[in-house]
Amino acid sequence: MQEVWVLDDEDNIRNLMKRYLEKEGFAVRTFSSAEDLNSALLNNSPDMFVLDIMLPGQDGLSLCRTIRQQSTTPIIFVSARGEEFDRVLGLEMGGDDYMAKPFSPRELVIRVKNIFRRLKQAEDSPALKELVYDNMVISPDKRKVIVDSVDLNFTSKEFDLLYILAASPNRPFSRQALLENIWGFDYEGEERAVDNTVKRIRKKMHEKGARPRLATVWGYGYKLDV
């Protein structure tokens, strides 16, 4: 049984999410503070997190940063703040989805199921091959990008984006296609998450002297020139 940990400081919202998720067969553990969740992580970990952003004490974004230092477990953010900046920031920091309050608990269940389905499809897909371009090696087994024997230390989303481009070298991908393939949805405004992820990839490649080039296709998207 897949386990989902729900973090929200509002009792009614936390209990509503728990009830709907349990009705769909998920095991659910709830927390009212990031500090309580951090303590629980010392002994166990879930298959997915649902994190409120605005919390007393440590907020959901900083908790996400902590989780991402040691885990790629899917994270869905929920927040009363639905501004584009918050959505993009949540995605950039490693979130897999974002829902603005108030939201339908049925929609939350659908999004949780969709993320688990994508993970299952990835597990069942044929093994991805290692890609080598000039002095850069992209290893899907180790999820590492190596330039001249140096690990570029990519995040999960950075690796996924680069691998999609590298698997079809010199082919342009639209921002919308990259957003859909990596984050699993296409919402207006979140294309900035793609742009900012590309900026971080470029910086890491440039600092280590990678000779392949991540090029902008103006008005459309990106490609990897090799």
Image (spheres, rainbow, N blue to C red):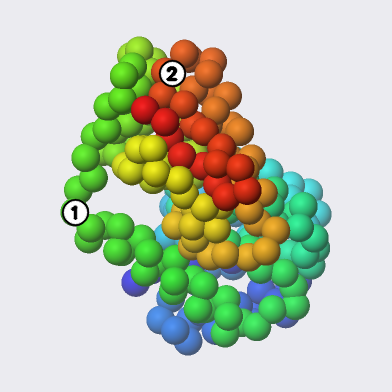
Q: Quadrant of the N terminus?
A: bottom left
Mark 2 is surrounded, within 10 Å at the Cα level, by few (under 14), some (14 to 19) or many (20 or more) other residues, namely many
Where does the image place residue 153, in percent across and percent down from the top left?
Answer: 46, 27
> From mark 2 to mark 1, how far is it between C-alphas?
28 Å
Where does the image place residue 114, in percent across and percent down from the top left?
Answer: 44, 71
Mark 1 is surrounded, within 10 Å at the Cα level, by few (under 14), some (14 to 19) or many (20 or more) other residues, namely few
Q: Secondary structure at mark 1?
A: loop
Q: Which residue is mark 2?
A: 210
Q: Is residue 94 visible?
A: no
Pick whichever, 205 or 26, lies toward us.
205
User: Amino acid type of disc 1?
Assistant: Pro
Is 62 placed left or right of 162 in the picture? right
| Residue at x 46%, y 39% (from the top left corner) | 223
**Count of marks, rendered view:** 2
Q: Which residue is mark 1?
A: 126
| Residue at x 55%, y 41% (from the top left corner) | 217
User: Amino acid type of disc 2?
Assistant: Ala
Q: Is residue 154 above or below residue 36?
A: above
Q: Secondary structure at mark 2?
A: loop
| Residue at x 32%, y 42% (from the top left corner) | 167
Name the image quarter holding residue 6. Answer: bottom right
Q: Is residue 18 above or below residue 97?
A: below
Q: Is residue 123 visible?
A: yes
Q: Is residue 165 above or below residue 207?
A: below
| Residue at x 58%, y 80% (from the top left corner) | 107
Residue 36 circle label: none
- Give the mark nearer the N terminus: 2 vs 1: 1
Marks 2, 1: nearer the viewer: 2
Name the image quarter holding residue 120. Answer: bottom left
Pick whichever, 42 or 2, lies toward us.
2
Where does the image place residue 86, in percent across and percent down from the top left?
Answer: 75, 54
